[in-house]
Image (cartoon, rainbow, N blue to C red):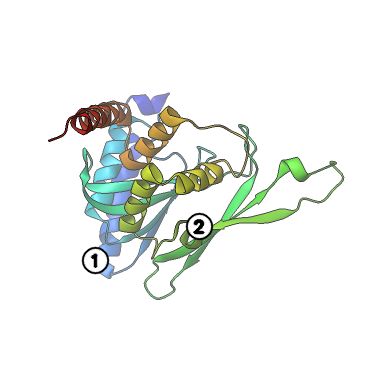
């Protein structure tokens, strides 16, 4: 509860992070950030998440990877030049790894990253999962199966923020890519995700900071207005 006294920078953690990134930048070193709760998650403090976002934008050349968990889902999220405008240039990607835990309605999974040893860029990742439906008895040894490679599954040229941003657009318009993303999100578990569910997932991917509820509301509202306008224009022969 004490973190609520100072939501901007509890215990000076962000100040420490800035100092580490500043020293790394001066030394020409690369940095990976490993943490737990993603800044866009509703359980993350809003002020903290927005300040963290600003830090990532400032040091995007130094930060070579962001690795988070907590949600238990297989996903990612993006950071843009302007945190309140997803039309600006994508700068950094945050990887949210799946959980070994089954909570809630999920198959256990883990992920292995491939890294370029020269510049420390993330080259690809592979996810493996345990299909609980195929586990007959508790006496059987777990049989981990290959789930997917990010580059192969989504036809990515690389794992840059630009490529992930293009993937989001394909998830929105390509039913096959949508199906793959939703299946990987829960590791082939039988969890239905309809239109509103997908809209929420996509908005969370694009937000990466805690006031995403307002951003999602405005984004979905504008999308519906555009669709209605398009339907009206298609009705008339101009």
- x and y percentages locating residue 182 in the rendered image: 51, 41
Query: Which quadrant of the structure image shows residue 133?
Result: top right
Q: Residue furthest front?
A: 237
Q: Could you tell me which residue is drawn at 37 percent across and 44 percent down?
A: 173
> In the drawing, does residue 213 fall left or right of residue 86?
right
Q: Which residue is mark 1?
A: 26
Query: Which quadrant of the structure image shows residue 148?
Result: bottom right
**Which quarter of the rendered picture does the C terminus lie within?**
top left
- x and y percentages locating residue 228 in the rendered image: 24, 27
For residue 188, above or below residue 164: above
Q: Earlier in the sequence, mark 1 or mark 2?
A: 1
Q: Could you tell me which residue is drawn at 48 percent across and 58 percent down?
A: 150
> In the drawing, does residue 100 fall left or right of residue 35?
right
Residue 213 visible in the displayed image: yes
Kind of element beneath mark 1:
helix
- x and y percentages locating residue 136 in the rendered image: 83, 42
Kind of element beneath mark 2:
helix
Q: Could you tell me which residue is drawn at 29 percent across and 47 percent down?
A: 79
Question: Closest to the observer: 167 or 3?
Answer: 167
Q: CA distance from mark 1 to mark 2?
A: 37 Å
Q: Residue furthest left?
A: 238
Query: Which quadrant of the structure image shows residue 85?
Result: top left
Q: Residue furthest bottom?
A: 118
Task: Count neighbours of disc 2 (C-alpha within 10 A) and say few if under 14, some if 14 to 19, many if 20 or more.
Answer: some
Question: Closest to the observer: 87 or 48?
Answer: 87
**Which quarter of the rendered picture does the N terminus lie within?**
top left
Question: Closest to the observer: 202 or 208?
Answer: 202
- x and y percentages locating residue 180 in the rendered image: 51, 48
Q: Which residue is mark 2?
A: 153
For residue 190, above or below residue 179: above
Task: Identify the mark at residue 183; answer none if there is no mark.
Answer: none
């Amino acid at each position: 509860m004490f973190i609520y006294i100072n939501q901007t920078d509890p215990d000076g953690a962000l100040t420490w992070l800035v100092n580490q990134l500043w020293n790394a930048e001066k030394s020409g070193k690369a940095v990976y950030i490993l943490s737990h709760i993603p800044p866009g998650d509703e359980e993350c403090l809003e002020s903290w998440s927005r300040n963290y976002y600003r830090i990532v934008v400032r040091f995007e050349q130094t930060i070579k990877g962001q690795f988070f968990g907590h949600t238990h889902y297989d996903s990612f999220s993006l950071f843009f030049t302007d945190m309140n405008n997803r039309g600006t240039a994508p700068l950094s990607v945050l990887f949210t790894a799946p959980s070994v835990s089954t909570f809630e309605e999920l198959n256990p999974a883990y992920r292995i990253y491939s890294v370029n040893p020269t510049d420390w860029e993330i080259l690809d990742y592979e996810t493996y999962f345990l299909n609980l439906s195929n586990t007959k008895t508790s006496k059987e040894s777990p049989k981990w199966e290959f789930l997917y490679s990010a580059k192969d599954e989504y036809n990515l040229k690389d794992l840059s923020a630009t490529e992930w941003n293009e993937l989001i657009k394909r998830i929105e318009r390509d039913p096959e890519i949508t199906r793959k993303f939703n299946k990987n999100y829960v590791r082939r578990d039988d969890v239905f995700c309809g239109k509103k569910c997908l809209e929420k997932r996509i908005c969370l991917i694009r937000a990466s900071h805690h006031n995403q509820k307002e951003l999602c509301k405005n984004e979905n509202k504008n999308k519906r207005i555009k669709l209605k306008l398009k339907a009206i224009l298609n009705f008339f022969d101009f």
